[in-house]
Image (cartoon, rainbow, N blue to C red):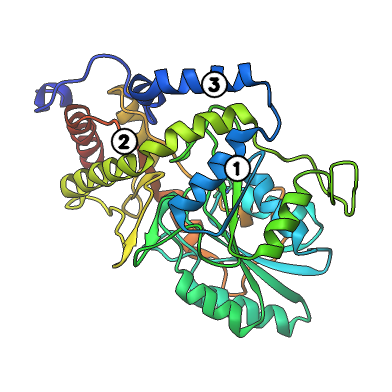
Amino acid sequence: MANASTARKTERPQGDIQFVDLAAQRARIGKAMDDAVLHAIHDGKYILGPQVTQIEKDLSAFCGAKHVITCANGTESLGLFLMAKGVRPGDTIFVPAFTFVATAEVVAWLGATAYFVDIDPDTFNICPNSLAAAIEEAKTKGMKPCGIIAVDLFGLPADYPAIEKIAKDHGMWVMSDAAQGFGGSINGKKIGTFGDVTSTSFFPAKPLGCYGDGGALMTDDDAMADLLRSLRFHGKGEDKYDNVRIGMNSRLDTVQAAILIEKLKIFGEELDERQKVADRYTAALSDIVKTPKLPSGYTSAWAQYTLTLPEGANRDAIIAACKAEGVPTMVYYPIPLSKQKGYAHYPSVSTGVPVSEDLAQRVLSLPMHPYLDNATQDYIIDVVRSALQK
Ligand SMILES: *Cc1c(COP(=O)(O)O)cnc(C)c1O
């Protein structure tokens, strides 16, 4: 009997297949980045140097937000906004149950209550109906709903038009957790301009990553921007030894800013390449498995390309079959936050979060980056198809 690999039409590429290929990006712009890093080091302005001011301007020009305030990482960008809003014990903040832990972690930092909401099965993002129900019932229970953190999971913008309307009806704020979504848009309006504030991460594997930790906040609100700049720098007032409020130390390194300046120059092209990779996966796989779909008017930053396996599929066996053929896959995320040990004591909407619980069992992300060549992708598709059909 012919085994799977001899039946295959494609050949295994030489070298390891990368889930995210940062080396390929370095091969393209490594020299420019090295020069920029050395320049920053020779320049000696290591904390909030001119490159930090420059990348804040460049990011603002890219996404259309009036102010960009960089900070140390994506998690702290979320936390800084909650600090700016004066979030405290007794406040209730609505978050999707299916996301990276940081979205709820920052709520816990401030002693507030995270309230888990279910997601939409087609977008993986917070479900507006579940959100509206959760807010109503929290009010009935005498809780104090004050804000919503929407996440652009896997790079797809959340349903901001619906979420902003719900927030307005209840006098609540909206933070866009765009750690994965920066680069996406809805009807031409870019991520960075939805809600009251947007936060993002420059963790290396994010669509726009640096070479360490980094993050940023975006807003059109002048007073909020000033407050965030103060909070990221020990609550500074007129100067750094004038401390007018309790803040923290959360700044983007000058060296990381220098790297981001170079990477942002090619980010638009990289987003186009990610879209092409996504289109090729969808064309080759949608007949046998549920592939991600963009709602009309939406563009995604394609942080991940995530399949929804059929009910009852043996995901572990599929992962193992791919791995045996050299194809790396990832499960984002295996456990919804509502079931995580550290978070299980927080409330969920009374109808539960069944979609989050179900999808945690069925999602599977494939290699996704702008430098995935056609031959390698064809091989991945071949391996995934046969793993799914076993
Ligand atoms: C990565 C991520 C964060 C946190 O970013 P860090 O820079 O790693 O702190 C927050 N939210 C989401 C949805 C993320 O994917």
| The CB of the residue at mark 1 lies under 8 Å from ligand 1 | yes
User: Can residue 107 be seen from the camera position used here?
Assistant: no
Q: Which residue is mark 3?
A: 37
* Position of residue 162 measured from the top left corner of the image (x, y, whole percent): 47, 76
**Quarter where residue 122 is shown:** bottom left
Q: Which residue is mark 1?
A: 215
Three-letter code, disc 3: Val
Return the disc, 2 or 1, that comes first in the chain's sequence: 1
Three-letter code, disc 2: Pro
Mark sitting on residue 370: 2
* Of marks 3 and 2, the one in the foreground: 3
- Residues at discs 3 and 2 in contact (Cβ within 8 Å): no
**Quarter where residue 389 is shown:** top left
User: Can residue 166 be seen from the camera position used here?
Assistant: yes
Three-letter code, disc 1: Gly
Q: Ligand 1 sits in which quadrant?
A: top right
